């Protein structure tokens, strides 16, 4: 009788799990498509995908304390980053440069939650989940969530809407929930972690010389960067020049932090003497992965080759639509 090493057994088991998962998903999808084709549009039901599965998946969660979910493809891991609502954060705004997180977060407003954390971490966070009830987050809850979501029954729950039973508001579409499940099921429980960022708090001086505990956005940015590296962007290694055409100091550097957080290479951040209303990208290679990814991140168009963009493969011109989102 042949005895196989443990690694070989795990490899075979993983292949069988993927095969079973594929057939379960295929069966459910075919059954659903048969019903949907008679009643409503598939695009309306599954929604538009906002995640390409190559980059890390990031979502703001209205847990207690507030957290970020990050699912990384390479290396395969999941991390929940928590931040106490009693923490003070730098905002980048001149009128109110330091605020208490609890004073800003309206837990019924997912867009507001993702915007606040985007500015706090200085990285783009487009997805959010707002729960109906208070959801305490701890190590046990994280492990429970992982086991439930990695289950072979999850595709059925996604298709029937059961997975959103405790959710008040989310912009994560069904198609992206499927893609997320496919990636999560291939991750080991030992690679699921909960990180409390309160350890980075330090005394900050605010109005009336009052001292509070806060975290600087630069520190949070350095922490989250190690979970967001995009291999496709790193592989292309295109040089990015950022031009701040907003009239708002600091907008160019925030945009630069967005780019570097996913592995982009920013060669310079300059300021234009004229202000523009719309953000846009200029590049010779409009079909590069990096250009398309950044266009989606900044919700902008891609134009032809840049003028005077010497030393850069991509010129990202930041307009006032960017500051309207993050510097109100």
Image: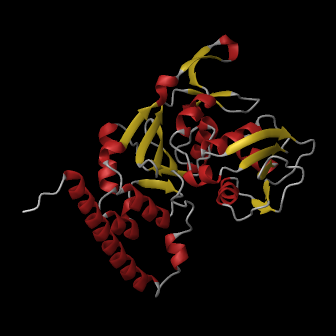
For residue 260, side relative to residue 189 (left or right): right
Identify the residue at horizontal 58%, vertical 28% (top origin). Answer: 219
Q: Quadrant of the N terminus?
A: bottom left
Q: Residue furthest right?
A: 273
Judge whether 271 appears above or below 15 on screen.
above
Q: Residue furthest front?
A: 2
Position of residue 234 measured from the top left corner of the image (x, y, whole percent): 60, 49
Q: Quadrant of residue 139?
A: top left
Position of residue 191 measured from the top left corner of the image (x, y, whole percent): 35, 44
Identify the residue at horizontal 51%, vertical 56% (top origin). Answer: 170
Camera-nearest residue between 147 and 170: 147
Camera-nearest residue between 201 and 314: 314
Q: Residue furthest left?
A: 1
Q: Quadrant of the C terminus?
A: top right
Camera-nearest residue between 40 and 23: 23
Q: Is residue 136 visible?
A: no
Position of residue 113 measured from the top left corner of the image (x, y, whole percent): 57, 44
């Amino acid at each position: 009788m042949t005895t196989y090493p443990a690694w070989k057994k795990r490899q075979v088991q993983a292949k069988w799990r993927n095969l079973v998962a594929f057939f379960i998903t295929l069966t459910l999808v075919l059954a659903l498509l048969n019903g949907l084709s008679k009643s409503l549009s598939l695009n309306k039901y599954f929604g538009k995908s906002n995640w390409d599965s190559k980059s890390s998946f990031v979502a703001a969660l209205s847990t207690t304390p507030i957290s970020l979910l990050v699912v990384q493809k390479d290396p395969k891991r999941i991390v929940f980053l928590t931040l106490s609502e009693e923490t003070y954060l730098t905002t980048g705004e001149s009128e109110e440069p330091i605020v208490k997180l609890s004073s800003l977060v309206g837990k019924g407003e997912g867009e507001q939650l993702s915007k606040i954390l985007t500015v706090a971490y200085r990285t783009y966070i487009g997805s959010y989940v707002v729960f109906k009830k208070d959801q305490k987050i701890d190590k046990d809850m994280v492990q429970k969530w992982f086991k439930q979501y990695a289950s072979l029954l999850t595709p059925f729950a996604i298709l029937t809407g059961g997975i959103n039973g405790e959710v008040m508001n989310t912009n994560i579409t069904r198609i992206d929930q499927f893609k997320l499940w496919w990636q999560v099921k291939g991750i080991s429980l030992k690679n699921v972690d909960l990180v409390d960022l309160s350890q980075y708090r330090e005394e900050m001086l605010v109005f009336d010389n009052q001292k509070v505990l806060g975290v600087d956005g630069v520190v949070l940015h350095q922490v989250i960067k190690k979970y967001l590296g995009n291999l496709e962007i790193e592989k292309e290694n295109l040089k990015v020049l950022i031009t701040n055409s907003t009239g708002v100091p600091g907008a160019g550097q925030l945009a630069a932090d967005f780019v570097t957080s996913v592995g982009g290479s920013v060669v310079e951040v300059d300021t234009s003497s004229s202000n523009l209303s719309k953000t846009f990208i200029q590049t010779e290679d409009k079909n590069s992965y990096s250009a398309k990814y950044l266009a989606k991140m900044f919700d902008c168009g891609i134009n032809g080759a840049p003028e005077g963009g010497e030393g850069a493969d991509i010129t990202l011109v930041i307009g006032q639509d960017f500051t309207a989102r993050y510097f109100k």
